[in-house]
Amino acid sequence: MSEKMFSKCGMRCDLCLIYRPNVEKNDRREEICKVYRKTVPGYDPDPKSIICDGCSCENENAILLYPPCEARKCVIEKGYIHCGYCEKYPCDIFPAEPSHEELVQKIDVEKQWTWEDEKLMEAYNCKKNMDEFRKNR
């Protein structure tokens, strides 16, 4: 099993389907873009062009999913590797994600997306990832 690789806000780059090294190994961007369209209303990414070098990439020409990310800026300013190291975690700028109850509502009741879709979104569960990191630290 590969080592967990966290973004600045706690996403799992090692699981991300648009992270460049993952795309180069096995391009599944079409699959994740379908899920993005369902889970993020109004977001219509192009699977042929969406890619991310990871917010820890030090290349000045790095391509980031969301360059103005406040959590990334904060973590860099404070000199942390990611939010899991911050004494103020989770703070107001930490990315929000649905609770388990909200997921059940969206999946089992409203049928907005599926549990398979949710599995593909595993990389983006920042709070779950950071809570686990802090528990195991």
Image (tube, rainbow, N blue to C red):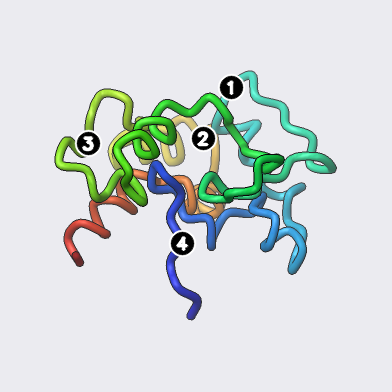
Given the image, on which type of amino acid does mark 1 rest? Pro
User: Which percent across, then down, holds residue 98?
Assistant: 36, 34
Q: Nearer the viewer, residue 62 or 96?
A: 62
Given the image, on which type of amino acid does mark 2 rest? Lys
Asked if residue 127 is positioned above or below residue 17 in the image, the reply reads above
Q: Earlier in the sequence, mark 3 or mark 1?
A: 1
**Camera-side mark, 4 or 2:** 4
Q: Earlier in the sequence, mark 3 or mark 4?
A: 4
Label 1, label 2: how far apart the Cα atoms are: 14 Å
Circle 4 SS class = loop
Q: Which residue was labeled with disc 2?
A: 111
Q: Residues within 10 Å of mark 4 (few under 14, many from 20)?
A: some
Q: Which residue was labeled with disc 3?
A: 90
User: Which percent across, then down, holds residue 95?
Assistant: 37, 32
Look at 77% across and 59% down and name the residue there. Answer: 27
Q: Earlier in the sequence, mark 4 or mark 1?
A: 4
Given the image, on which type of amino acid does mark 3 rest? Pro
- Disc 3 + disc 1, Cβ < 8 Å: no
Asked if residue 119 is positioned above or below residue 98 in the image, the reply reads below
Label 4, label 1: how far apart the Cα atoms are: 27 Å
Label 3, label 4: how far apart the Cα atoms are: 19 Å
Q: Which residue was labeled with disc 1?
A: 41
**Camera-side mark, 3 or 1:** 3
Name the residue furthest bottom. Answer: 1
Look at 84% across and 43% down and name the residue there. Answer: 48
- Left or right, 53 with reference to 1: right
